[in-house]
Image (spheres, grey):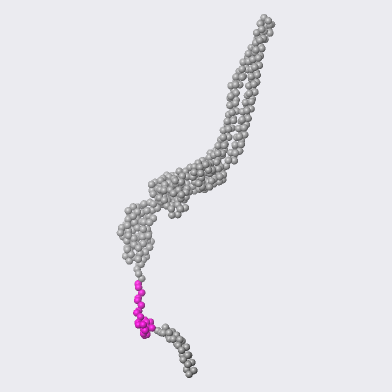
Amino acid sequence: MERKRNSIVKGVAALPLVAMILALSAGYAPTASAQNPGLESKKGSDPLPAPADKPAERKVAAYVVDTGEIVKEIVLTGELKARNSTMISAPRIQSSFSNTVTYLAPEGSMVKKGERIVEFDDSSLLSQKSEAERTLDEAMLNIQKKKADLEAERCDLLNSLSQAESSLKQDELYGRISKDLLPANTYQKYQLNVTKSKLALQKAREQMDNFEKSYKSQMALVEINRSQAEINLKKIESDMKLLKIDAPQDGILIYGDNWASNRKVQTGDSIFPGMEVASLPDLSSMQVLGFVYDTEYSNLSPGQRCRVRFDALPGYEVEGVIESLTSVAGRKNFASDQKVFQTVVRLDRVDVDMLKPGMTAQVDVPLVLAGGATAIPRDYLGVDNQGRQFVLKGADLKQAKKEFVEIGAVGDQLVEVLSGVKTGDRLIAAQHEAEVSK
């Protein structure tokens, strides 16, 4: 009985193992399929796989020929400048042929009227001022000395005049003595003394008159020396004031160009009289000064519309119009031998908060080479090995055929076709030439 119980227990314990073996056997059993046609499938016969689809024909975009304008853009470079500007130039002074800059207010800073913006070296004028002051002091002393000398001379002449008058009175007393009371020679002596005294008195009076007449002229002579010394001193002081320049109005400070160094003016530069040192532009009158090469000059004329872009303001554009063109080419700058024409572009609107003088600008001028022409995009025009232009005429790759054409004006985007296609024709891009030729 005990042995039977143990057998039952062992049988029950082996059941899971048997079930697992059966499951694995069922999973690996072969089924009927196209690879095993002799075997029956318990789930029924599976259908054969469908044949692979053929690759779809590639579609390309077709362009419908139409009329349009053939436009080519000329790109000019230039600089933003103000039409109206107050120029600050180096002063003209007698003491120096050039002026050395010792101070410049920061470029681009907003300055107020009366604020110091430029200073030049005045060391030589300071020494000249000291010399002029010494000369003036000497002239003042000479005036005082001359006046004292003339007063002393006047006293001497007055004394001589008084003595002459006194001598005449005395001699006249002796001359009145009767001839009968004196010896003849004595009487003649007294009469001769009277005549001499009269002549001496006349001479003394003439000397006094001449002195009075020359007094003013002699004083005027030394006064002239003093006036000249004062003028020289005032001129030096005026020149010193010219070397200190204050802003004549409110505005933004822009440095001038130092053509000798091909850069902006800076502290330490020697500036010739009349040369621009800085300017205070009127920001509301901003315009573009562009440079035009001789190859582009004939394509431009006043009144043409254009579009202006600025390197410092990506994405910002403003419309404008060409206002003028110079008729004579000149050097672009002092250090360049290349000659260019200049054009002035007036902007339709000026944003004073964004546009600043000196910004580099690019001016795009569209030129209409042909209007109402049969036009196609440049991508749809091809050139073969012999240099002949062609198009691929057709709505798709199957129908497309190579057609040689004659072209006219060539723009940036469109090309004028003179013969070979007409409006309404469908074209595919020339890059598909190899596919069409197969």
Measuring from the top left, give residue 298's x and y in whole percent. 40, 48
Residue 47 is inside the magenta segment: yes
In the image, what residue occupies the spot 59% across and 32% down? 229
Measuring from the top left, give residue 360's x and y in whole percent. 46, 50
In the image, what residue occupies the spot 59% across and 40% down? 123
Residue 274 versus residue 180 in the image, above or below: below
The quarter of the picture where residue 40 lies is bottom left
For residue 396, side relative to residue 213 (left or right): left
Report the label total. Answer: 0
The residue sitting at the top extreme is 180
Asked if residue 79 can be seen in this view, the reply is no
Measuring from the top left, give residue 310's x and y in whole percent. 45, 52
User: Residue 343 or 351: which is nearer the viewer?
Assistant: 351
For residue 340, side relative to residue 186 (left or right): left
User: Residue 197 or 334: which is nearer the viewer?
Assistant: 197
Residue 232 is inside the magenta segment: no
Residue 308 versus residue 8 in the image, above or below: above
The prevailing secondary structure element of the residues shown in magenta is loop
In the image, what residue occupies the spot 40% across and 46% down? 323
User: Residue 251 or 85: which is nearer the viewer?
Assistant: 251
Asked if residue 213 can be seen in this view, the reply is yes
Residue 13 versus residue 73 in the image, above or below: below
Quadrant assignment for the C terminus: bottom left
Residue 137 versus residue 278 in the image, above or below: above
User: Residue 224 or 369: which is nearer the viewer?
Assistant: 224
The residue sitting at the front extreme is 1
For residue 228, side relative to residue 316 (left or right): right
Measuring from the top left, give residue 50's x and y in whole percent. 35, 76
Write down the region rendered in magenta: 31-54
The quarter of the picture where residue 200 lies is top right
The quarter of the picture where residue 99 lies is top right
